Each structure stands twice: as structure tokens, then as C-alpha cells.
Image (spheres, rainbow, N blue to C red):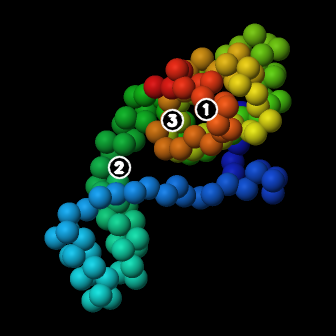
Amino acid sequence: MNQDSALFPAKHKLADSEKITINLGFVDLGQVDLMVAEGFYGNRTDFIRTAIRNQLATHSDAVRQVVARKMLVLGLQHFSADDLRALQAARQTLQIRVLGLVTIAPEVTPELALATIDSLEVLGALQASPAVKAALASRRR
């Protein structure tokens, strides 16, 4: 069930990032703008990405320990309708636990998702149809 993004056909091209919104105090924002104006960073986004990566590197050991303890899949996990139908035929269900990105194919119906996905814990992003997301809402941790 776990597939590498390089194996996706072109129709499954995924965005490699997700947009987030943050609120910064005026003084912090001014300092970011000063760093950009002085040429340390190309723009605010570069500064924020660098700051986030530095913090993640600082805490990388803790992240690795939590991933192992919680038995999370690290990276990308994709589920097609065929994957879920095979599970259903075998009378099996999934407990999905991912740090990264989970994609559920557009052709997966809410009924199929409910029949095959017991629980869903995603630290990162979930890409699925609005109907499937709504159906699985009560199973998300």
C-alpha cells in the first residue's frame, strides 16, 4: 500500500508542499523584513522555511523517537480504490498512522473508505475528496 511518489502516474501529480498561515508580532515581522532587506534571505518565506528547518534539525532525535514509539509511517502513503477493495474482499481494515502525506484516490467512495479504514492519524496533510474527508472525520485522531 505504501508507494513512492516517483511511481505515481502523471494523473497523480501531487503538490510538494502545503500552504500555512502564521501570525507574527510586529517587532518579529520587522526583524524578518530587516534580514531580508540586508540580503540574508531572499524573502520572508525563505526566512521562515529556514527557521522551521533549523528547529526541526534541532529536535530531530526527539522526532525520530516519537515516530518509532507511535509506529508512524514517515513520508507518503497513497491508497487507491483497488487497494481498498482488496482489503474489503479480504475482510481487513486499516489503521493509518502517517507523519507526512496521506492521499486517498478521488475514485474512493465514502462507503469504501468507511468499510476499510478504522482509524486515521495524519501529522501533516490528508488529500482526499471532501466526501471521504467528511466520512472519515469521526475516525481521525
**Mark 1: few/some/many CA within 10 Å (<14, 14-19, 20+):** some
Q: Which residue is mark 3?
A: 122
Residue nearest the observer in this picture, 119 or 68 = 119
**What secondary structure is found at the residue carrying circle 2?**
helix
Q: What residue is shown with label 2?
A: 60
Q: Residue at x 20, y 69 (%)?
A: 26
Q: Is residue 140 above or below residue 17?
A: above
What kind of residue is marked 1? Lys
Q: Quadrant of residue 108?
A: top right
Secondary structure, mark 1, is helix
Q: Is residue 17 above or below residue 116?
A: below
Left or right placement of residue 11 versus residue 125 in this view: right
Q: Position of residue 47 (x, y in %)?
A: 34, 72
Q: Earlier in the sequence, mark 3 or mark 1?
A: 3
Q: CA distance from mark 2 to mark 3?
A: 19 Å
Dot 1 corresponds to which residue? 133
| Rendered image: mark on residue 45 | none
Residue at image position (71%, 25%) is 110
User: Would you say the residues marked 3 and 1 are in contact, meaning their CB atoms lie under 8 Å apart?
Assistant: no
